[in-house]
Each structure stands twice: as structure tokens, then as C-alpha cells.
Image (cartoon, coloured by chain):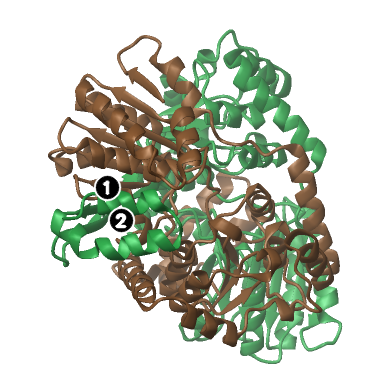
Chain colours: A green, B brown
Amino acid sequence: MRFLDIRDTNFDAEFAAILARGEETGREVEQVVLDIIADVRARGDEALLEYTRRFDRLEADSVAALQVTEDEIEYAFAKVKDEEIAALKLAVERVARFHEKQKQETWLSTTEPDILLGQMVTPLERVGIYVPGGKASYPSSVIMNAVPARVAGVGEIVMVAPTPGGEINPHVLVAARLSGVDRIFRMGGAQAVAALAYGTATVPRVDKITGPGNIYVATAKKLVFGQVGIDMIAGPSEILVINDGSGTPAHIAADLLSQAEHDELASSILITTDRGFGEQVATEVERQLAQLSRETIARTSWETYGAVIVAGSLDEAIAFSNRIAPEHLELAVANPFEILPRIKNAGAIFLGHFTPEAAGDYLAGPNHTLPTGGTARFFSPLSVDDFVKKSSIVYFSAAGLNRLGRDIVSIAEMEGLEAHGRSVSIRLK
Amino acid sequence: MRFLDIRDTNFDAEFAAILARGEETGREVEQVVLDIIADVRARGDEALLEYTRRFDRLEADSVAALQVTEDEIEYAFAKVKDEEIAALKLAVERVARFHEKQKQETWLSTTEPDILLGQMVTPLERVGIYVPGGKASYPSSVIMNAVPARVAGVGEIVMVAPTPGGEINPHVLVAARLSGVDRIFRMGGAQAVAALAYGTATVPRVDKITGPGNIYVATAKKLVFGQVGIDMIAGPSEILVINDGSGTPAHIAADLLSQAEHDELASSILITTDRGFGEQVATEVERQLAQLSRETIARTSWETYGAVIVAGSLDEAIAFSNRIAPEHLELAVANPFEILPRIKNAGAIFLGHFTPEAAGDYLAGPNHTLPTGGTARFFSPLSVDDFVKKSSIVYFSAAGLNRLGRDIVSIAEMEGLEAHGRSVSIRLK
């Protein structure tokens, strides 16, 4: 952990080490993934079965046999505790309710005579949701990807999840059912992404693929982008807490550690106007670290990419926050709504002393898929918008075209596009 | 041109040749572009000046000297005819008015006690607009990229345009000024994209780069994606006209040619339920082709990627359209609004017999930057949405966290993320 002062002359240099934590895709990974994609396009189901055998140690006679059955889902419901099902249901409900508010309507403007202009919103027909396997197989990821798709009105939601050895997390199955996933295939990696992007005899081609994954999955998504839509490419997770000396150091320390336990590359940063408070938080982090089951991961993250920064004023802290555009931003200050309008770049903003980021991770309502690594400058949280597309609507009557025709022809002529102009003038009286 | 019947057994095979027209980026192009990007990151202005000298034959002592001056813009206004300025002004006004309707408001939901949830919409701080040089330097491209950015509230719009030999199209300068562009640099290619993405001593770093360009520009945009936002990667342009035998063959022929004149890779397709009408359109295309200044381009496009398709019914034609997801779709039928709700995938939809696509290209109002090559399945037209980003807002009071805390902890436990749970339980009473 670095204890820094933003007013020090070497601050930028010191902080640069924390920012430089994204993994660059090596050319070798890209070549491996390109080969897998080409193979799945060429040999379809057969290639899928081979890769699943090789990478997931899962044998199957057919891709259809990789599909999760109704019985397996029922078994998962039987296995999961009632209060857990209730918690997942609550999460699905709350996430659905929040995302309902993001829905945009088709509109048609009728304010101008002879001309109608509008925008039609249509759900994607079919989407694929990638859910990582093994330990990172999280029911909350399923909810955060499937629910916005369902709210958007997507026709079919196809989920893929690698299941090393065939085992699939029952909480994930329960979450998938509660979120409205239509089909689940036990497959993962670049091969699953390729199958969703191009379709095989058994796996249907989708219009968009969302969801987190390892470097092979992320690279595959990047490479099929354009053939299908994808959500943002997520990097390691991060949190920035802005503090003014108010609140409880132990609470802030717990929030920093909730981020740090994700993985070694996660970054947890506190920026405070109160040096003493910052010191207390640092002490608390050490104390709490020793009690964590994921201590090793959290400690590595905190030691490598953690920081407590002292700022001269809240203004300085806010400017810093806008510059790094954090994925998660906690405004752990006495008057969080007062500074909200000055936040320009952040994936999700958690206000006040009783809104730990974890609330947003699971069931507050907003999506937990957020732009990382400073990309909140231009990316938005995953939303219903990701699962619809728009078409412009243009209608001119003969009178409308007559009114605007000459100006259209004028611009066509400037551009030397004669046939454009002719398609208008041929219709003019 | 192919004259096909959708009911023929070999239709799909015949049509496949038309669909297979996208250019794949070669590995060599990618390597050249990677090198240019690395060089601009390393040497900044100096590298920019070298590439501009080499590729655009433009000498300058400094990058600042590449910036278009106020005098040059005034000179452009003096050189462009008054009626042309009026036409461009009309386009800017209409495009602005349409895009105003796309603006989304920040919202905060206050329906639940103790918990506030919302979404904050913030304009991007600075964007870069790429405008191709030479013959494809179109004022309409400037308008369609800059106006949505301005309407969104973007802080600064930086435009780049390669100017082989230093010359810049005066219509483009006028359009840039009318659209609210703040600064214009005479530079292009992968080097301009790299400069905008990473910033140099003179060129400011932007948050997003939009606008069309050649294969080097498109590849550069793809490679800097993630460092900055980009708009969709546009392929060659296309139009599909759906017809029911109503209307005038010469009009439809003119519309098909307005697309074909763009470039040799453009694709113009008519699908009609009336074989005789289709034959008349084909004859008309031949007749009009001979009269075009861009005959060679249009003829190559029409002969290679043009088609007249006979369908057994409007239903068949609509299903075909939804399958290929055209960039531009004309519903040249007697009752276009009747079939509108059945259109699922299209960039822009032009309804009726007096709405040639060219109207939408210039000044109807909607954007002319549209998803090509079937990507209307999941991409939307360029819009105000591209120039803002969203942040989720979450506020819990102590009572709110107490109400939901146990369920949050329950999900954290399912996921084995103990520190997530602790950040909540440490605050619970």
C-alpha cells in the first residue's frame, strides 16, 4: 500500500504504478483464439466437443448433451436453501425494477407538416451470456446480465458456462432460471464465444454476447466484435473512496477490502482530506485483512495496487476522481449529494456512509457490470440499452420532399454525388 | 446485377456472393498501424509531423501550424455560395432538432423509503471527429458527427482531416463551423487517430473518436478502442428497397443508383412482389447509369453487388429484410406504416414513395452514420447516446441498509466473497 499526498511533486509518478495494471493481450493469446474461432466456424459442434473435452475435461457425445436439463435445474432448486433462493429472488426483482426505468420508447415526431421523423426501439432477437466457471461462477453475474436482457424484451437468452468436470454451481442455475435464461450450455472459453457468434448445428447464433471471462474469453469477444455485438471489455475491478474525515475508519477499510478480495489485480484507493482518518483506515485494513478467508488475494491486491492519498481539499479529491474515472466511487462524506453534480466520470457512485459498494454488487438495483480502468470517461454501466437497437424512421410526403428537395440537391452537388441529387429531383414537381 | 427469385432453391447460394463483400483487415495493415500508433505515443508531435509530411505531402514546422486558422474559416465562408451556406445551415438545424429528442435526462427514483437509486447522464468531455480527405471529404459527415456531440453537451469537439497538399474543402470548413467544431487539425490516417487517443504536446487526448475513414483509419480506431471510445466500424454502404408493385420504377432505380455511386463495394438491392416492376427497374437502372458522372463506380457496384429479387409475398420480402438487416431500408409500398412494426433489423427506414434515402443522408434530421453489413441486428445509428455516458447512483440510509443487509450478506456468502459481506454487516445494527 502506498500512503501518498496528492500535493507532493512526485505524486503523479508514484501513482502511475497503480494505474499501470491492465493486462495487455499478447499476440500469442490472440493467435490461439483466432485458431479456435476458425476451427469452430469450420467444424461446428465437432470442434466444440473436442475443445470442451480438452479444456473442461468434459466428455459428451453431442453438443445437445451439453445443454443443462430441466431436471438439473429442479435439482439445483432443491439443493439451494430457501433463504438463499429468497435473496436471489429479491435481487432479480430489484434489478428488474431498476432496469425497467431505463427502457426507451419508440417515438415519432409529428410537429412538422408533411414529414414524420422518429426512432424505433427493437429488442435484440437473441443474446448470449457468458458466465465464468469454477470459483468465479457467480449467481450475481447471471442476474446482472440476464435481467436487463429480459427487461429489454430479448427473444431468447442463451447462457454458456464452462463446467470443469461437468459440475455446475447450483446458485448459478437458480439465478439463471429466476432471471429468465432460456437455455444453458455447459461450455466456455473462446470456443463458446465462437459458437455463439457464428452458430453451430446445435448452438444458435446470437446478436450480442455479454458477460465477464478470462483473457481467452475477452480476446475472443474482441475478435468476434462486428460479427456480433459485445459489452465492454472489463479489466480488473477498482474502488475509489472520497472522504472528508467523517464516518468510521473500520467501515471504509471493509469497503476497500471488499474490492481487494476480488483478485490480485484489483485496486482499492482512499482519498481523504483528513490525514489522521487515512492513517486509521490503513491500520484498520491491516487488522481486518488478518481475519479474511481470502486474505492472500486481498493482501496482494492491497499491497500492490492499494493506496491512501491525502488531499488538500475535497475539490482536489474530486478532480483526482474525475481524472482516474473509477469503476466504483464511494462518496463517504458528510454531504454526498452536495458534491454529486461535480462527479464527471464514474461507473457507479455510492453516496454516504451506509452505502457500501457491495450493496450495488448484488441487489440495490443498478447493474454491477461497470466500466473499469478509466473507461468510465466514455463507457456506461451495462443496461437495457445494450439489449435493444434503434432504427431511424423517415417519412416525406410529396409536399415534404418538394419543400426540402432543393436544399438536398444542393448538398448532393457540393459533395459531387449526382445520383443522390437525382433521386430527389426526379420526384420533384 | 443478379435477377433472382427468392423461392428458387439456389437463392441462398446465389445471394451469398452479394453478402460476402466486407473487407477483412489484413495482418499487414494491422502491423503498419500498430507501428504508427506506437511511434505517435513515443514521439508525439514529431512523429505526427513526419507522417503528415510523408502521407499527405504537407510540410509544417509544428503541429500547431497544422491547425486551421480563423482566417481560413472566414475565407471558406467567403468562397462558398450563399445558397450552399443556407442549405448547410438548414441541415445543421434539422439534424440538431432531431437529435435534441434523443437526449436522456438524469433521473433519481424516490419511490422507496431510505433508498435512492438513479442514473446520471454526463456528456463526454472531449471528442475527436475524423473527416476523410480528398474526394470523400463530405460536409454532411461533419454535420452528422459534430451536431450530435454538440447537442449532447460535449465540452470540446476536435476535428481532424487529412489534407493532401494542404488543401481543405471549404464546404467542410463551413459545415464544421456551423456544427460547433472547436478546433480542426490538418492531419489524418492512423497517426491522427493515435494522436487523438493518446494526446501529444499539441493535440489533446479525447474520450471518443467517431467518423468514417479508410482501412488504416478503421484499423487504428479498432486498435485504440478501450483507450478511447469509438463509434461502430462502418463497412461499405447498402440499400434494400421493398416494393409491392406500387410506385414509379424510375424513382426506385434512382434510389438504387444513389447508393451504387458511393463506391464499388456498395450494394443496392430491390425486392419486389411484382416481377414486371422489377424488370422495369432493371431497365431504368441501365438507362440512368449512362447519364451519371460517376457511372464507372456505380456500374461496377451494380453489376457486382446489385440485385433485383422477386418475392412471393410482402411477408417473404420482410423476412428477407430482417435477415439481412440492411443499413438503409426503403419501404416503397402503398401502405408503408402498415408494415413498419414488422421490421426488426434496419439502420434507417424510409417510408413511402417520396422518401428517397438521399433525404436522410443530408437533412431530414436522423443521423446518416448507420450500421452496415448486417450489424443493424445489434448496432444503432450514431446518436446523442454516443456522446454521453452514464453513472449509476446508489444511496442507502442506515435504515435502508438494515432492511436489505441480510440478503446482501446471503448472496456474498454464496459467492464466497466474505469481505463483501463484512462491508455490509459491519454497518448493521
- The quarter of the picture where the N terminus of chain B appears is top left
From the viewer's side, name the closer residue of A201 and A422: A422
Q: Is residue B50 above or below residue B212?
A: below
Q: What's the amino acid at mark 1?
A: Phe
Q: Residues within 10 Å of mark 1 (few under 14, many from 20)?
A: many
Label 2: how many residues lie within 10 Å, few (<14), some (14-19) or many (20+)?
Answer: many
Instruction: Calculate the distance from the C-alpha at mark 1 to the C-alpha at mark 2.
Output: 9 Å
Residue A82 vs B365, above or below: the answer is above
Q: Disc 1: which chain?
A: B
Is circle 1 on the same chain as circle 2?
yes
Question: Dot 2: what SS?
Answer: helix
Q: Is residue B92 left or right of residue A316?
A: left
User: Where residue A53 appears, x then y in whole percent?
Assistant: 69, 17
Among the 4 quarters of the image, the one containing residue A149? top left
Image spot of residue B210 (x, y percent): 55, 60
| Residue at left offset 28%, top offset 42% | B330
Mark identifier at residue B153: none
Q: Name the residue under label 1.
A: B350
Residue visible at 25% across and 42% down in the picture = B251
Chain where mark 2 sits:
B
Q: Which residue lies furthest to the bottom in this view?
A: A312
- Which residue is denoted by mark 2 in the rendering? B359
SS at mark 1?
Answer: strand
Front residue (pair A156, A419):
A419
- Seen in the picture, residue A11 relative to A180 is either above or below; the reply is below
Q: Where is residue B258 in the image (x, y as percent from the top left)?
A: 38, 46
Q: Is there CB contact under 8 Å for labels 1 and 2?
A: yes
Task: Give the image location of residue A230, x and y in percent.
Answer: 54, 44
Residue B239 can be seen in this image: yes
Picture quarter containing residue A260? bottom right
Amino acid residing under circle 2: Ala
Q: Residue at x 60, y 29 (%)?
A: A194
